[in-house]
């Protein structure tokens, strides 16, 4: 089974617009090596596709969604509008395997993506993402920062406005 290396722009646009690429999804209660093996087993390096596992309800349910995608850019295939802006229909585009880790606690964007040259280090990379998630500290929302700053700094009194009469030349 030889890996797909490139695709015509119009072909990928048609696949993405109609969501006509294979998607394999399965649930898991927690992450184990068996989950990585199943994720890899469901992934097809010969065609545009997505293999995903939703752990503890997936990112929508407060858990994690981990997926492998064969795609031309380091963007999830579901980002149709971005792909339309990036792809010229007549261009030949190289495709790569991307590992996408989605979680509320991985980054502000709730997503980390890495390009994988091969799948031999899949489990190690997923474990590294879980380590990032475990050590992640949520940023303070900007509105709270403004409120705190307002409380610590007293407001200056408004400057007095004086009106001056301008002399007119005769």
Image (spheres, helix red, strand yellow):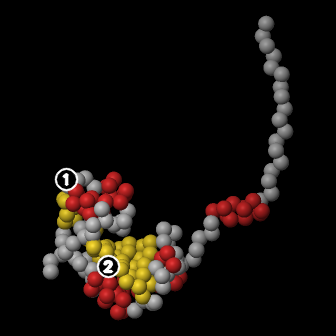
Please tell me how crowded label 1 is: few (under 14), some (14-19), or many (20+) other residues with Cα within 10 Å: few
Mark identifier at residue 24 = 2
Quadrant in the picture for residue 100: bottom left
Depth check, mark 2 against mark 1: the one in front is: 2
Find disc 1 in the rendering and name its residue: 90
Q: Residue at x 69, y 60 (%)?
A: 146
Quadrant that contains the C terminus = top right
Sequence-wise, the earlier of marks 2 and 1 is: 2
Please tell me how crowded label 2 is: few (under 14), some (14-19), or many (20+) other residues with Cα within 10 Å: some
Quadrant in the picture for residue 142: bottom right
Q: Residue at x 29, y 76 (%)?
A: 116
Residue 109: percent from left, percent from top: 48, 68
Q: Residue at x 35, y 74 (%)?
A: 114
Residue 30: percent from left, percent from top: 45, 90
The answer to whether residue 166 is left or right of residue 130 is: right
Quadrant that contains the N terminus = bottom left
Question: Is residue 71 something that shows in the picture?
Answer: yes
Q: Is residue 8 above or below residue 65?
A: above
The answer to whether residue 49 is left or right of residue 101 is: left
Q: Secondary structure at mark 2?
A: strand
Residue 32: percent from left, percent from top: 40, 92
Question: Is residue 129 something that shows in the picture?
Answer: no
Q: Residue at x 52, y 84 (%)?
A: 134
């Amino acid at each position: 089974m030889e890996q797909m290396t490139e695709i015509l722009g119009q072909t990928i646009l048609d696949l993405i617009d109609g969501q006509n690429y294979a998607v394999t999804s399965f649930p898991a209660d927690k992450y184990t090596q068996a989950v990585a093996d199943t994720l890899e087993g469901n992934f097809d390096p010969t065609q545009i596709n997505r293999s995903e596992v939703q752990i503890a309800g997936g990112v929508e349910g407060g858990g994690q969604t981990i997926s492998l995608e064969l795609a031309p850019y380091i963007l999830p295939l579901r980002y149709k509008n971005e792909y339309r802006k990036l792809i010229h229909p007549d261009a030949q585009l190289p495709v790569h395997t991307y590992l996408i880790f989605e979680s509320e606690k991985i980054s502000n964007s709730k997503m980390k993506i890495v390009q994988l040259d091969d799948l031999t280090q899949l489990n190690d990379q997923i474990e590294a993402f879980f380590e990032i998630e475990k050590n992640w500290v949520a940023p303070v929302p900007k509105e709270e920062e403004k409120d705190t700053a307002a409380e610590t700094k007293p407001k200056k009194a408004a400057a007095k406005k004086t009106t001056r009469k301008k002399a007119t030349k005769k």
